[in-house]
Amino acid sequence: MFISNAFAQTEVAAVAAGFNWIGTVFYIIALGILFFFLFIRPQRKQMLMHKQIIESLKVGDEVLTNSGIVATIKKIKEKEFVIEIAKGVEVTILKAYIVGKV
């Protein structure tokens, strides 16, 4: 209302002329690298460790499930374990739900 139209137009033109594409591209690449090192790389490392733990398990090993149950492996299937959580109580559980070896 109090700013003249000519002054407003010169401000917009000055901002548009100062836009730097190289800085923007560098900023996007830097964010991508930061995202990789903070999120993707640690998650990949954790998945690899879990896979190695699962592959090293054999019948008779005591394992910890992600629900906190300590059980003994009775049978190993392709994607599942049959575990014994108490005497005579066997449960089938997916391999992804095993946290580690006790």
Image (spheres, rainbow, N blue to C red):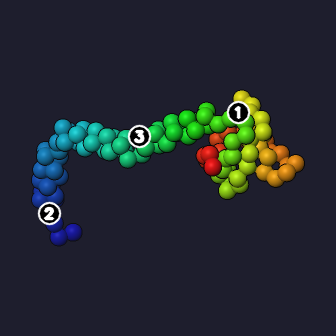
Residue 83's spot in the image, x, y percent?
Answer: 77, 43
Instruction: Say which amino acid is labelled 2.
Output: Ser
Q: Nearer the viewer, mark 2 or mark 1?
A: 1
Question: For residue 7, which numbered disc appears in the image?
Answer: none
Identify the residue at image location x=17%, y=44%: 19
User: Which of pointers 1 and 3 lies earlier in the amino acid sequence?
Assistant: 3
Residue 13 visible in rendering: no
Question: For residue 79, which numbered disc appears in the image?
Answer: 1
Q: Residues within 10 Å of mark 1 (few under 14, many from 20)?
A: few
Mark 2–mark 1 Cα distance, whole angstroms, equals: 72 Å
CB atoms of marks 2 and 1 within 8 Å: no
Mark 2–mark 3 Cα distance, whole angstroms, equals: 54 Å
Identify residue for label 2. 4
Q: In the displayed structure, does residue 57 sit left or right of residue 19? A: right
Instruction: Say which amino acid is labelled 3.
Output: Arg
How many numbered marks, from 0 up?
A: 3
Residue 54 visible in rendering: yes
Q: Within the image, what quadrant is residue 95 found in?
A: top right
The residue positioned farthest toward the top in the image shown: 78
Residue 28's spot in the image, x, y percent?
Answer: 29, 41
Instruction: Say which amino acid is labelled 1.
Output: Lys
Question: Considering the numbered disc 2 on the image, is that residue within a helix, a strand or a loop?
Answer: loop
Seen from the viewer's position, the closer of residues 6 and 37 is 37
Residue 85's spot in the image, x, y percent?
Answer: 78, 51
Identify residue for label 3. 41
Question: Considering the numbered disc 1 on the image, is that residue within a helix, a strand or a loop?
Answer: loop
User: Which of pointers 2 and 1 lies earlier in the amino acid sequence?
Assistant: 2
